[in-house]
Every structure is written in structure tokens, then in C-alpha cells.
Amino acid sequence: MSPVAAPPSLPPAFQAWFAARGWNVRPHQMAMVEAAARGEDALLIAPTGGGKTLGGFLPSLIELAALSETTPKQRPHRLHTLYISPLKALSVDVARNLTTPVSEMGLDLRIETRTGDTSPSKRQRQRASPPDILLTTPEQLALFCASPNISTFFADLRHIVIDEIHALAPQKRGDLLSLALSAISRWAPSARRVGLSATIRDEAELARWLAPQSPGGPERQAAIIRSAPGARPQVEILDPAERIPWAGHSARHAMGDVYQRIKAARLALVFVNTRSQAEFTFQELWRLNEDKLAIALHHGSLAPEQRRKVEAAMAAGKLDAVVCTSTLDLGIDWGDVDLVIQMGAPKGSSRLIQRLGRSNHQLDTPSRALLAPSNRFEHLECEAAREAVAANALDGEPLHAGALDVLAQHIMGRACGEPFMADALHDEIRTATPYAGLDRDTFDRVLDFAATGGYALNSYERFRRMVKSRDGLWSARTPQIAQRHRLNVGTIVEAPMLEVVVSSRGRGGQRLGQVEEYFIEQLAPGDTFLFAGQVLRFEAIEEMTARVTRSQDTTPKIPSYNGGKFPLSTYLAARVREIVQDASLWESLPGQVRDWLDIQRLRSALPRADGLLVETFPRAAHFYLVCYPFEGRLAHQTLGMLLTRRLERLRMRPMGFVANEYALAVWGLRDMSRLDLDALFAQDMLGDDLDSWLAESDLMKRTFRNCAIIAGLIERRFPGQEKSGRQITFSTDLIYNVLREHEPDHILLRAAWTDAGTGLLDIHRLGQALTRIQGHITHQALSRISPLAVPVMLEIGRESVRGEGQESILVDAADELIAEATRLD
Amino acid sequence: MTDPVRPQAHAFRLNGVEALADAGGVLVLPGVSTLIVSDLHFEKGSAYAARGQLIPPYDTRSTLRRLAERIAHHRPQRVVALGDSFHDLGADGRMDAEDVAALQALVGSIADWVWIEGNHDPAPPPRFGGTILHELSIDALTLRHLPAEGAAPGEIAGHLHPCARVRGKGRSVRARCFATNGARLVMPAFGAFTGGLNVCDAAYDRCFGATPDALIMGTETVYPVAAAKLIPDRAQSRPKINAAR
């Protein structure tokens, strides 16, 4: 570390600037300046509106101000500070915010952004003549690492600022970023790291994540700097005049109340959890909009130009409300929001607190939020979330060990940049906290995977992508291989998307946004659906676009598509279980919800927080088993798959199952009330049953596909040729089958298996739940359905029944064929 | 673990000849003790590796194992590999020694093994044994790789890699299939890494005059599904199998 002269207080120019604005420098901002003077890594935790961004940049601005005073006017600019955020838009926003102090203090600084949208010529210019402050994304850093002769570019780097660090760190993007930082720290040994966040579940964990580790040495962590807490938010749960539905996520019953609140507010943000909810809420609010309020729609599938328009209108104060998804979660301040409305349950307390931060950017006045649960269970969940906010209890994913597919990408990337020695790279990688425990054997296997595919059948020697020189330096075999790698950098694997284009009489067209290919594939021409606030009629698919026309219908035929469902957080789930079991906690619930729970207590039993309630009952021609683990839809789906396999073996002839966030219902042709439930729910289902199911699971294949793309086994695209998503899905399924058959312990299967534990299958959480309930199963053999079972039973038919029994579709089609007595039979 | 899969076959008449479409992807003519398999595409994995995508090298092994199982099950006197058995002319040279031995043993175990020439393998390598033919006539049937355009009653061909998609409630399922109108048939591709071309594609119209019916391969049985029930994939330009020619 080369210590910078520690400023005991702000330089005069800065003091004057704060004074001119009528501000005092805040203690946490000063603490950041002092940490920088000591050369320490620092994690700053401050609520939105707490001057967090300025706190992160103040040390850089002070140093750069000093630099520009002591050097000639035409000083050569060198990269001094790197800023990384999860969103392109956030980089642009921060660049704009930084220009205010910089220009008002008359500092001679160059501040630039570099994202996926930056033109090749500007990128080249930035390489040759870097700005003082570069604002960019993790993917761009990975690209830097994969560029030749890059070390000098970073040589003078002093500060690395990572914004919204809590959002990046738990993801694969966080792994990618952490690895890129390990390389940059080698090239810029005196650069320190700064993390910024408003909502952190585990401060120490993130402080460790931020700091570079020293392999073999003691664990290191960044200094934690906290601002004074802001005023506690005021959270209200809507007690609607209308009847609260048993199931569903539309919150239609609450729209009238919500509309009145919007009318009373200056600018309301209406958060929803899925794009279909956004579309629905937007449509319903406009149906009620007698006052012609300016209500806009903002979600990730809309065309960028449409989103930009909404953002500009917000900033200009022209809107009364915006219905939005998580696209507006992170810290971009588009306007003077004074009310946040959450439609449906927030699913996690950290997400709710983050969303609350969108309103009222003054620290000392509380932000206001209204929660509008869409069904009875969500009332419980909202109650739990309100308590969590009051206690400032944050949840979130715990950090995990670094993913091996991301590691494979990084190793290949390093070979495309400056050649490396394997020993040195292993040491360098272990300075990245997620990979601090990476053993040499695993490292070597991943290196071999990147070089040759890493197969036991050692047949790809002559096709290797990386070669080792006589003096032990690894590099990409050809410049073409390196170029192809750069096109595939990143960890975000999007579902294949189609452009939605409206045309009249099949000609021309306006681009409305993108939808998942799988959704469109379910539509027949003529079907109507809701998108971009309009009812659209699906016409045809042409190449990569879905051609639609505007429909006169007011109710779309195909109600929704599931974009971006969040699972219920473990933390909130536990709180919901506690509320349900204890009637003394029901006071704040609406009467309707209390009555519902009361009847459940009389008719069956209340689920116990530390146990599992299982109900069995007959209904129509079928027998049902309903259980209430409260572990989120993904874990319940996995449980449903495994239970139906077991029930099949027990000759219960299960027909299907449906899961929601709280419960799972299985039905079949035999009475399941006399089964040994302890045996049925025994943990060993995570052994052989899981194994044989995974052999053919769609979700596992999707997980594998993502790993295969990230690891570089298959490419997203070739130069000049976009590979359609369909082809990738298809071929990775075949690759998965063959690899599983011949080399089940291949490193990529290991990576996919690890992902399955937390991702789409949530096996890890299911495993914890099965442990929790062991010996604590309460069985209620009922003569008819219980009140608590109604919501999940209502999902039957509404949700497509998830099962791997895809062939039932073929059986049906073949049966119909026989009925029609066609020429084949 | 689940029971080992025992594929069942669908019996029908093809241009008047008794035939069995096996759920494992082979066609059996019981009257003449002949098993037909198409588009094995040996060494497709290594062909991709040579172009920089290091996908697993086990496709030949996997394909061979499944083929050996089907042969052991049906015990035919004659096996006809209906073209594109080898992914390219270099496939022979890239094949692992163990796979070479397995293939030689398999061919050697059959009284009459016929390699039909395909567009990927206009000259199948001779070292594995068997007879190399351009096409073969058996009773009222003609076996060739490329399906003829226009009416060709009695033709059994490969090349197109037929797949069918059926829509169910809220989702659809896509699987390999035999494409037929009762008079002629296009075989599913058997190779482990072979993709598929939906039978609703215009390429099938040129052979069948309309979308053919599909005998869809399930895990344990074959599902006959009428053309009217089949839906196209989303529109896309001609798939890789033709581009790779």
C-alpha cells in the first residue's frame, strides 16, 4: 500500500462546495475518506437518500482534484477509479449525478461509461486514452480480463467502487466480478475496494466477499462503515372493502382502494412481482381511471425506447403512478416518489425494504408503503413482512462457493488475455473470496475442461482451445478462439426471446418488446393475450419475431405468462408459520382472514411452525393429499415430483400435483390416508428418487444448459450468426444425456448439480425442510377439503400441472386419434 | 431406480408390407428378418470439437450401445444402415479404438449388414465390414437415404430427421418420430447427437404431398398421431442438418 496523505478534514474546495449547497458532510462520508487515506477496503451501508454514492466517490474526487491541481493542464489521464454496478442504467445515472459536484467545483476530470451499448470506436479510444473514472458492468470487466496487453491499462488504478453489492454478490455475476477483481488486483496492487449497499442481510459475510483474500493466510474483510439509520418506514396493509380471494395473484379486489391511494399521492410506484401482474394491474387501474391520472407501465420486456420514455416522464414530474416490476428496484431515482404500493406479497423483506427506498429520498422523514395482498395467504405473508421491516430484519440468499462454470469461463478468458502460469493463476483465483477454498485438483480439472473439454476419454488433444508453452505459460491456441470466447462472456443466460411486433394487415410494424419463446409457442394464431398494456391478437411467428395485431377484446383469452416469479424467502416463510400456529398473533389480520384460520382450526388443525400438517380427503373421483411446508413454489414442485414417484411405487396411482408458495396438493386414484407418512416424507427421497428423476428432469436439463453456455461448452452465438435459442436447448439435452451416461462425475455435471441445489429445483431448501419435519408430521384424515387447502386446490387447472409425465400429452393425442378412427389404426 | 426401459413396437403395414416401428427408433420388417436404422452420425461430437466446440466425445459409444440393444432384441438376419452412418469423411479417423472394435464386432455378428450411402458419408469406410450399396429393394419396398420428391410408394428413406410436436394443456412435447402416410416412410435419426426437423416443414410436403402422420417415439412405446394433431415449431430457416452438407 502506498499511503496517501490523510486529509484530517475536507480540502477547502470541497468544504466550500458543501457549504454552498447548504450541506454538511455526513459522518459516514468522512469515515469513507479516512478509510481511503488508510488504504482500507470499505463496505458502506447507508439507506437510500443517505449520500451513499457521494460517500463512495468522495475519496476519488479529492485525490483527483489534488492531482489536477499539481499537474499541468494537459495532464495525461490514467484510469483512477472504476465503478461497477449491476445495471447499465445505473452507471449512466451515477455518471450524470457525479457531474454536478465535478462541474460545480470546476474539477478537470474525465468521467465515462462503458457498457454493452458502447460503440467499438469509443471502446478503442477508452483503451488508448482512459478516463479518470470509468463506470461499467461486471461483464465489461470480464472482457477486459480477456483482452491482450491489459495489465498496463489498470496499472494506476486506485479505487474500485461496487454499487448495489448485495445484489451482485450472491449471483453468478458476483462470481464473475470477484474473479475479474482478483486479476485486476494483481495488475493494480494499490487499488482498494469499496462496496455500497442499502440492504445487507449479513454485513460481515459481504465485507469478506469484498476484500481480497490471501491464500493460506488469515481471513480478511473490508472495514464496515454505517450511516445513521433513516426514519423507519411506515408500512400499512390494505384491509379491503371487498371480499379477499382464496387464491390467485390478480389483487383485482383491491384495485379500487389502490386507485384511491394513487389519487391521493403525488407520485406512486406500484410494484408487482411478475410481468403478467404488471400488465393486469395496469389494465385494471386504467379501467378505473375516471380522473385521467397519468399512469404508466414499466417492465423488463418492454422495448427500451418505451421504458426510456416512461423514465423521462417520471423525472419530469409528468406522471401520477408507474406500475413496475423489479426493473425499478435498484437505485435509480427517476422522480419524487412519495408512496410505494406493493401488489401481492413482497416475498422477501430485503426486497420490500429496497422497494421502500424508492420513495421519499429524505432521510429524516419516513417513507410510506401500502401492501395490497392478493389472497388470504398473502395477508399472512404481508404481516410477516411488515414485522420484518419494523425490526429491520433483512433476508436474502446466503453467499455460496464460487460456481465452477463461471470459473471455467474466467480461466479461458485469462488465456485470451495475457498468458498465465497455472500455479500463479490458482493463487490469484484464491484471492477471490468465493473461490478461496478452491482445491488444486478441482482447479486443474476446470483448467483441463477449458482446454480440452476435460473428458476421461482423452480424444480432443488436437482440438484443444488452450495450449501450454514450453515455459509453462497458458494461452488461447488461436486468435479466432480468443475472439469467439469474447463473444460469449457473461453469466446471464436469457430464455430465448421473441420480438413482439404489431402490424396492421400484416405490414410494417411497431416493436413493443420481447416475450419468452415458450409462451408464444403455446399460442395458436387468433389467441389474444395482454402485453404492453394492450390486448393483442397473436398472428404468426416469423424468424425471431412474433407478429401480432391489436385486438378489440377487453379480456384476453390467454390470461398470463409467468415472467419473474420470486420464491418466498426462507426468513418470511418461518415467520408466516409462526403467525399461523399462534392465534394471539392474528389481531392485526383482517376479520376475513382470522375467520378462515378459525374454521381451519375447527375443521382440521393449524400447521405447527416446527412440523408439517398433512391432510388427506376424498373429492369427486380422486383422493387428495395436501401438505403445508411453506417453503416456496420451487421446493414444493421438487417435493411434488419426488412424492409422486414414491406414491407410484406404493401403487397409489398418483395422477398429478400442484404447488403454490405455501402448500402442495397431490391427487390419485387410491386413498392415501393409511400410508406411513413418516416413511413417505423421509429424507432418503433425496437419494435414489432424486437421482433417477434428475436423469430426465426438464429443469435439470435447463440448469445444465445454462452451465454449458456459461462454461463455454457451447456458444451463445458465432461471429455473424445468431444461434437460435431453440437449437441450443435441443442440443444441450442430448449432450446432458450422453454425458450423464458416460461420465457422470464430469466437472460440468458437478456444476449443474450444485446449481440445482439452490436454483430451479431448490433441493437444498427442501432438504432442510425434510430434516425439520422429521418426526413432527401431523396427519388429519378428513372427509372433505379443509379451508387451508382451498387456495392450492384452486390452482389446479389454473397452473399447468407440472409433472415430468410429458408423454401423457402423447397418450391423449394418440387416444383422440383412435377415437377419430383415422387411417393409421 | 426405475426398471430398464423395454421399448414396445407399433405394428402397421407400409405399402402392404408388415412393419414394426420400434420405440427405440429402428424399423423392423419381420417377414424378411430385416432391421433398418438411419442417420447414425457416428463422431458428430468430435466433428464439433474440431470446430472448437468441445462437446462430449461419447456420442458414437452411446449410439452403438443402443443399436446393439435393439439388434439383440429383434435378432434380425439383416441390418440396413440407411445412410449418414458416419457424420463426415473424417469420422472413421477420429473414432476411438474401443468404439472401432465394438462396431466391427457388431457388424460381424450379422449375416448381412448393408451400409447405404448417405450425403454425409458418400463412401462409408470399408474396414468395418458389410456391403455398401446406393439403394436396396426388398419386396415392395425401396431403401435409400435421400427421400425422393413426389410420389414414391414403398420408399423407406432417412436424411430429414423427422420430429413431431404435439400440444397439450399449457405446454407441448416434441420428440423424434417415423413420418409416414402408409405408402412410404422417413426414418427417425438414431444418432445420439442428431437434431430434428419438424414434420410440418415444407420438406415433407415435397415427399408426401402433405404433412405426414407421425409415429412418435415415447420412452416405452410408439404413439401414432395423425397429421392434423401435429403443430410446427416456431418458424425457422432450414436447420443445421441441411446447412452442414
Image: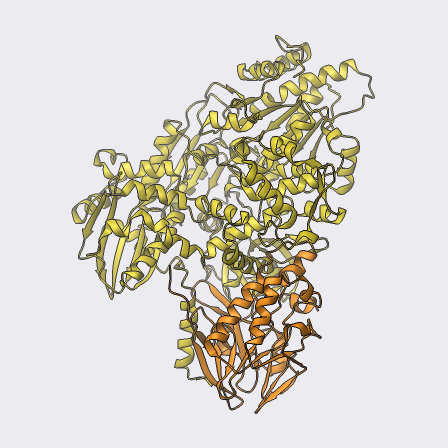
Chain colours: A yellow, B orange
Question: In front: A823, or A257?
Answer: A823
Q: In the picture shown, does residue A76 fall above or below B181?
A: above
Location of residue B192 (image quadrant): bottom right
Where is A555 relative to B151, above or below?
Answer: above
| Residue A128 x %, y % | 79, 33
Front one among A392 and A556: A392
Query: Who is closer to the viewer here, B69 or B149?
Result: B69
Kindly identify the residue that appears in the image at 45 percent across and 39 percent down. A262
The number of numbered discs placed on residues in the rendered structure image is 0
User: Residue A536 vs residue A257: left or right?
Assistant: right
Query: Where in the figure is residue A113, as x and y percent of width and height?
Result: 69, 34
Residue at the image point whose x is 70% and y is 56% from the top = B51
Direction from residue B122 to residue A205 in the image, left or right: left
Q: Is residue B211 visible?
A: yes
Q: Is residue A316 visible?
A: no
Answer left or right for A142 relative to A358: right
- Image quarter where the N terminus of chain B lies is bottom left
The residue furthest top is A8
Placement of the C terminus of chain B among the 4 image quadrants: bottom right
Seen in the picture, residue A731 relative to A604 is either above or below; the reply is below
Q: Quadrant of residue A3?
A: top right
Q: Position of residue A155 (x, y in %)?
A: 73, 26
Image coords of residue B130 (percent x, y): 63, 78
A173 relative to A11 in the view: left or right = left
